[in-house]
Amino acid sequence: MQNITVYDIAREANVSVSTVSRVLNGTAPVKESTRNLILEIIEKYQFQPNALARSLIKKETKTIGIILPDITNPFFPEVFSGAENALREAGYTFFLCTTAGDSRRESEYLSILRERQVDGILFLGGRINRSNCEPDLVQEVVDISKRIPVVLINGDLPNHTFYRVSTDEYLGAQLGVQHLIDLGHENIGFIGGRNGTSTTDVKVNAFRDTMRKNGLSFREEWVLYDDFTITSGKILMEKLLNMYCKPSAVCCVNDFASVGAIKTAIKYGLRIPEDMSIMGYDDTILSTSMIPELTTISQNSVELGKIAVEILRALINGEEVAQHTIIQPKLVRRQSTSINCVHHR
Amino acid sequence: MQNITVYDIAREANVSVSTVSRVLNGTAPVKESTRNLILEIIEKYQFQPNALARSLIKKETKTIGIILPDITNPFFPEVFSGAENALREAGYTFFLCTTAGDSRRESEYLSILRERQVDGILFLGGRINRSNCEPDLVQEVVDISKRIPVVLINGDLPNHTFYRVSTDEYLGAQLGVQHLIDLGHENIGFIGGRNGTSTTDVKVNAFRDTMRKNGLSFREEWVLYDDFTITSGKILMEKLLNMYCKPSAVCCVNDFASVGAIKTAIKYGLRIPEDMSIMGYDDTILSTSMIPELTTISQNSVELGKIAVEILRALINGEEVAQHTIIQPKLVRRQSTSINCVHHR
DNA sequence: CTGAAAGCGCTAACAT
DNA sequence: ATGTTAGCGCTTTCAG
C-alpha cells in the first residue's frame, strides 16, 4: 500500500499542497469550506504527515534522547517518568538509550542521537560519574553540546561547564550519617559503590567529614567498595560481619546495596534495626517494599527528571537558564535505623 | 553554526555528493585515495549524515516504538532491556512511550509513532489486556498494523489476529495454585488485579479450575480485586484478615500485590510462610529483595522482550513468522510458601 | 485566500 | 570509479 502524501490529498481536494500544509499546521487562514473538504479527505485516508520530512525542513524533531546506565535500577525509571510526563503534552517523544555505564555504548548513542537530530539530550551515569574522566570522553560531550542542548543529571565532567541538575549528594550522605550519629551510633561503616565514581566518592567524603565533625573516629576497613548491586551489598556486609570489630550502623551507597546488606545481616542472625541500623540511598520502590522498610535519602528522582527537561526546553527555546540547578535531598525515616543499643568493644 | 552536509564534504574533496554517499554507505567501490580524502574531511568537520534525510528516502528509520503502561513497574524495564539488547547492535533505537494504561495516551502515541515512521511497534498493557476492548480501540491497532509491524506482548485484541508473544498466564497461575495445593493448602485466596483485565481474569480462571480439578472448593469472597499495586495488596490482605474464615495461602496477581500482602500480614502478626503462604507473579527484582523472598512465577520478562523484537525484525524483513509465540512460565520456589501447618475450621 | 516553486539533506538510478 | 539528476514528503517564501 503506497503511502499517501500531501500531494494525494491536494489532488483529491483540487487545491495545492501548500493549502493542505496550511490546514495541517494552521499557519495561514484557509477558507472554511476548503478546509473542511481537506479535513474530510485526510480523515478518509487516515492521512498523517511524515514527521521526517517535516523535521527535515523545520530543523526540529520534537525528540529527546535520554542516556542512562540501567533502566532496570528503579531509580532511573523514576527520572525517566518525571522527564516524560513533563514534556509529553508538548509533543516530545523520548529515545531511551541504556549503556550499562559503558563509555563505548555512550559514545555510540551520543553519535546516534546526533544523527537522529534530537532536540536535546539528557545524560546520566557512566562517564559523568567518574571521578576523573578521560579527556576524549569529555571532549565528545563538549562537542555534541555545542550542537545540541545537553543536560547532565547528577554528574559532571572536568574542565568544562555544562548545564546540569543534581541533588546535593554530599548533603544527602551527611544527612544520613548525622541521622545515625544522632541515634547514638559511634561505630559506623560505609558499603557499596565503586571507588573512583563520584557518587561513591562524594558520599564517602561526606561520611568521613561528618564523623570527624562529630568528634568520632572511623575505621577505614569499614569503608568497603564493590558495586551498586544487591549482590555487592551482600558480599560487603558479609565481609563486615566477619570482622572482629563490627559497626553498629552502616550507610549504603544506594537502596540496592542496603537490600543486600539487610538480607545478609538477617541471615547472620542480626535483627534490623535492633542489632544494626542500615541506611539506604535513593528512596526507590525497594525501600518501602522491604521489611523493615528502609530509612533512606530521597533525591526526588521524579523531580530530577522534570527539572532536567525544563532546562532542556528552555535551552531549546533559546532562553537563559541557570548553569547548575541543585535539588535538596532529604532524609526519609523509616524502619531500618534505630537508637544504638549495641555496645561495641 | 551552519550544519554541514554531504555537499560541503563533496566540494572540499572535489568530488560529487554521490561519491561521498558511497563512502558513507559502502554501497559501491571508491578509489582508495579519494575515499581516504573524504574520510579525512568528514573527520575534520565531525560530519555525521542526517538520519532524517536518509530515512526519508530509504523508508526505514531503524527506530522501534515501545508502548507500555508504566516503566516504574520493574516488570517493564526488564522487557525493555530484553528488546533493546537484542536490537541495539543492529542499529535500532527505541522510543519509550508510557501510557499509564490510558487508552487516550495509547492512541496518541500510536499516532505519533506512525508520524515518526517507526519500523515497528511493541505494545504492552492497556487495551490489549482488557477482557473486552472497545471496537474502535481495536480498529486503531488493526489500522496501524497494516502499515507498520506490530507485536503485542502478553495481550490480545478480539476479532482480529495480530502477531503476538505471550507467556502462558493460565499455565503460570495454575503452576502457582498447584504448588500451594501440593504443599497441603486447601483454603486458598486470590488477590489483586482488576476484574475485566485479561491478566487478572485468566489467572483467576486458572485458579478456580485448578482448585476444582483437585477436588477443592473455594470461596468467592476470597477472590478480591482492586489494582496491581503494592497498596492494593495491602488493602486486600487487610480485608482477608478481617474475615472470620481466612485462607492459609494466597495467590497474588503480581509481585507488587504480594509485597503489599506480606507487609500487611506481618503487621497483623502472621509469620510468612509459617502462618500463611503467599505466591507472587512476575519474578521481578522485588521477589529477591524481600524477606522472605517471594515464591513466584517467572515469565522470563527479558526473554519476552527479546523474542518480541526478533519477531518484529523478521516482520520488517518480510520473513514469515509464527502468529503467536508462547513462552512457558515457570515456578520459582523461594521462601514465601511452605507446607500448610494451619488448621482451618 | 491560494498556487508555484524552491529546497531541507540525503540516496539511487542512470550515465559516463 | 565517478558525476548528474531526480526525487523522498513536507514547509515556506513569493506572487497573485
Image: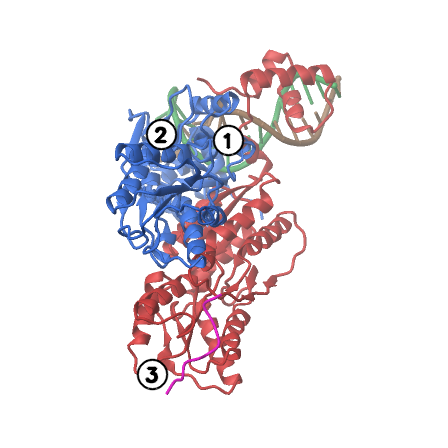
Chain colours: A red, B blue, C green, D brown
Residue A245 numbered mark, or none: 3
Magenta stretch encompasses residue A175: no
Closer to the observer: label 1 or label 3? 3
**Camera-side residue of B274 and B90:** B274
Which image quadrant for residue A308? bottom right
Which image quadrant for residue A194? bottom left
Q: Position of residue B72 (x, y in %)?
A: 47, 48
Q: Which residues are magenta?
A: A335-345
Determine the secondary structure under disc 2: strand
Residue B110 numbered mark, or none: 1
Closer to the observer: label 2 or label 3? 3
| Residue at which label 2 appears | B164
In three-dimensional space, the C-alpha distance between marks 2 and 3, rounded to whole angstroms, equals 57 Å
Circle 3 residues within 10 Å: few <14, some 14–19, many ≥20: few
Determine the secondary structure under disc 1: helix
Q: Position of residue A271 (x, y in %)?
A: 38, 70
In three-dimensional space, the C-alpha distance between marks 2 and 1, rounded to whole angstroms, equals 17 Å
Say yes or no: labels 2 and 3 on the same chain. Answer: no
Name the chain under label 3. A
Instruction: First in sequence, mark 2 or 1: give its number.
Output: 1
Q: Amino acid at mark 1?
A: Leu
Q: Amino acid at mark 3?
A: Cys
Q: Amino acid at mark 2?
A: Arg
Which image quadrant for residue B146? top left
Q: Position of residue A312 (x, y in %)?
A: 59, 51
Say yes or no: labels 2 and 1 on the same chain. Answer: yes
